Image (cartoon, helix red, strand yellow):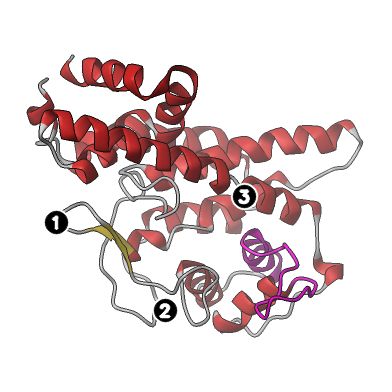
Amino acid sequence: MSMHQMLTMDVGELSAFQGIRSERLIRENYAPTISDGRWRKLALSFMTLDKPITTYTYPLISHWDFAAAPGSGAHHTHFGGLALHTLQNLEYAAAWTEVYAQRGIKLDKGLLYATIIIHDCMKRFIYSFDDDFNFVKAEDPFIAKREDHHSWVLRELKGRGCDRDLLASVAAIHGIDDVALDGGVKSVAIVNHYLAIGDTGLQYTKDDVRPEHVIAFLSDSDWHWSGQVQRKTGLLAERMARDAGLSRNRLMVYLGSRFSYENVGDYIEKHGYDKAAEYFTALIRG
């Protein structure tokens, strides 16, 4: 395949590299271990959700399949990014549970895995790319003052009759870091902020913190590294695109969709940009 032929690949073909594989592993290895049938049904339904039953402040701009959706503007911004990000979080969580188990601490894996599967699913409706493959979204900047994918998923969970245990766990995954919006320090402030703007009517206290919440939060805090390798992939794409006369943004999305930003960034770390450009150009050309 030539570099120019690569640009004609459609979303389905690109999502097959990371997204479809990741979704299959989620369904095969993690969803079946959610023993609570209510939680398992919710987790699977959010992956295939066609029409939300709750409202969202901003216009919806997309309707991705779970396996095709981008993961974020800061990390996993490629086709299949949402599924890959979710799978990675589940893999991190599984490792953390082993550490806890060695110390005799029993965890509810079903609560943990359902939380992770559900937590970013509303991105399917509010993340997209424009015609020039710039990432676009319909939400406030993190941390949202008014509305974002996390406040919406909490509202959608409540609207679907989710019990407090799972709803509180999903709320905690994005905010159990004790940082207040005013710049001070206040316990579980972010969790309660999201519960409030998500119209849940719930309050979260220090006594609500569970090991599953902590593991979910830690597992979702991979964006420092994934964001760094995404940035490096962008620099590589700029170099490769300039040499081949291609679109930098589209080439970057392609590299992430096919190889993952983690793999591209790791190769750059080990071999540098020149060798990385040669290596990935050769792979693309087949």
Distance from disc 3 to disc 2, alpha carbons, whole Å, reads 27 Å
Closer to the camera, 60 or 115? 60
Q: Which mark is residue 221?
A: 3
In the displayed structure image, the side of residue 128 where residue 57 appears, left or right? right
Q: Quadrant of the C terminus?
A: top left
Return the disc, 2 or 1, that comes first in the chain's sequence.
Answer: 2
* Residue type at numbered disc 2: Thr
User: Number of labelled discs?
Assistant: 3
Residue count near mark 2 (Cα–Cα under 10 Å), binned few <14, some 14–19, many ≥20:
few
Say if 16 sits above or below 218 in the image.
above
Say if 113 sits above or below 46 in the image.
above
* Residue 39 sits in quarter: bottom right
Could you tell me which secondary element the residue under label 1 belongs to? Answer: loop
* Residue 274 sits in quarter: top left
Q: Which mark is residue 131?
A: 1
Residue 12 shows up from this direction: yes
Could you tell me which secondary element the residue under label 2 belongs to? Answer: loop
Return the disc, 3 or 2, that comes first in the chain's sequence.
Answer: 2
| Range covered by the magenta-colored residues | 164-188
| Residue 265 screen position, x and y as percent | 44, 30
